[in-house]
Amino acid sequence: MPGGAPQTLRPFLSRAEQLYPETEIVSRTHEGVVRYDYGEYADRTAQLANALDEAGYGDGERLATFCWNHHRHFETYFGVSGMGAQLHTINPLLPDKHVQYIADDADDRLVFVDQSFLPKLEGAVDGDPDSFGSVDRYVVMGESVPETDLDAVAYESFVEGQPTSYDWPTVEEERPAGLCYTSGTTGQPKGVEYTQQMLWAHTMALQTPQALPLSDDDVAMPVVPMFHVNAWGLPFSATAGGAKHVYPGPQPEPADLARLIEEEGVTLTAGVPTVWLGLMEYVKEHDVDLSSLERLVVGGSAAPEAMIRFFDDRDVELVHAWGMTETAPVGSVAHVKADLRDADYETRLQKRTKQGLIVPGLEFRVVDDGGDPVPHDGESFGELLVRGPWVTTEYFARPDASEAEFTDGYLRTGDIVTVDEDGYLQIVDRAKDVIKSGGEWISSQELENELMAHDAVAEAAVIGVPHERWQERPLALVVPTDDADTDTLDETLRDYIGSEYPTWWVPDNVVVIDEVPKTATGKFDKKALREEYAEESLVEGRVPDDAAPE
Ligand code: ADP
């Protein structure tokens, strides 16, 4: 190692603690708003590390979270990784069977869980307690523990009385620090591990002006959940820059976000389009002061043009970004290049609706079906391939999946893009067969398999159709068996899926068809189905309110 120290997360926090001990960390929790500073934050991460040590957890082990965005969740970010352990942020919105598979696959030892997610976790654990990883302890994020059969302790009792300093080890940079699962297009969810070095490199890249830099005059509010690729890395980069942090807590409503922006002077916030559509509606009807807000980052799904205009009109710069779990996640940001800054508004807007320019440190290629590069003319399209220090090259314990999705160190993103003459990437299609509703994945193949297991179904295809609020919603196209009662099929099948899956997975409509069109190789022709049924879509009033909650 030529440098004097490995590339790890810990120095970001020690610097913030030294230089900005009084800068605030604010958190909306079910117990009210909690407010403290980097000094106290550092003390509490040390207490957490001591408590984990004492309870026999740590070094090299995987410790999981099942939580919204709040200060305690943030304490696990530096506390767990600083000990040389690995933080596995589980997405609590997933179907129970996925949660169970993930905890088992990761062999988690302990779970930090929000009170409000405790019933959901109990459900997943109950399914088969023996296969819930190696978990033998649950730490409930609060001051007390509600009644539960799980071996649970309250977070505050767990850390209470522990020393406020900890002998942080020098962790090697190859050590896994994070783990996040992404939806499998076929088969089970796949884990992506983040080493200390990957997270360090991603943090440093975010801090470049071409990405999403944060400094000591910023107030950062990640609305994107902390179980989604470390809230897009913002808790780390906000610490690196010495920014104030604001965590919006359990299931924030637009009114909560508006209030936090106003009261805490938020300068940068980030989330999926669904969240901002909610805020837009709220802003139209209420008097909200957005004057502190400089940047509003939109990713996970495409930022609608109308949304960019809406925030431009209010002097808030909407920054469109693209990323993936596999890219830790930020890969491109749609800044306006210097030589385009004098162009007229519509030209600049057109660039900003694209997914943007690759961030410094990453390389990309766009290749056609034959693997040849496509011209950068804004029209030719191909699959986007990326590689770089914070892009994974394999899936956790899944050599089968890894082989299919990586070529020469490049990740095959499954996103079909164009590149224009200025280098802006634009997603035009998706090669992977998944549906993204409100920022959360729904596996079309899994739903198809479930549907085809039903007696009344001969064949079923599930496609994503455009939806204004959730970007996409699932629609089921079903060929019934001869003796199926087609009058009640829609209700029967929706109930059937609803009994196994969260409401937001249930197709909003079941349409009876004669035959599923097939491609030359005999696969379901989803493209043809999407074209034909895009308008058919959804039955009024059926789209669940929380499809999916952010
Ligand atoms: P994240 O949690 O960051 O959304 P996922 O791994 O769940 O990461 O999803 C990544 C995929 O989401 C991308 O491959 C792409 O299909 C889609 N995606 C991400 N950002 C955008 C965007 N700005 N516009 C369109 N699609 C996007």
Image (cartoon, rainbow, N blue to C red):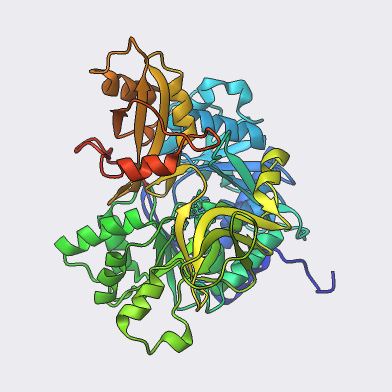
Horizontal placement of 211 versus 484: left or right?
right
Foreground pick, 341 / 489: 489
Give the quadrant of residue 480.
top left
Foreground pick, 2 / 307: 307
Farthest residue, direction right: 1
Farthest residue, direction front: 520
x and y percent of residue 19 in the render?
Answer: 58, 77
x and y percent of residue 454 in the render?
Answer: 41, 17
Tell me if residue 274 can be seen: yes
Q: Residue at point 25% right, 18% down?
A: 488
Farthest residue, direction left: 285
Total label count?
0
Tell me if residue 295 can be seen: no
Identify whether 550 is placed above or below 18. Answer: above
Foreground pick, 392 / 253: 392
Foreground pick, 416 / 328: 416
Horizontal placement of 258 versus 429: left or right?
left
x and y percent of residue 197 in the render?
Answer: 71, 62
Horizontal placement of 257 versus 211: left or right?
left
Give the quadrant of residue 287.
bottom left
Identify whether 111 is placed above or below 25. Answer: above
Quadrant of the drawing holding the N terminus: bottom right
Q: Residue at point 74% right, 46% down?
A: 59
Q: Residue at point 29% right, 51% down?
A: 253
x and y percent of residue 384 in the render?
Answer: 57, 60
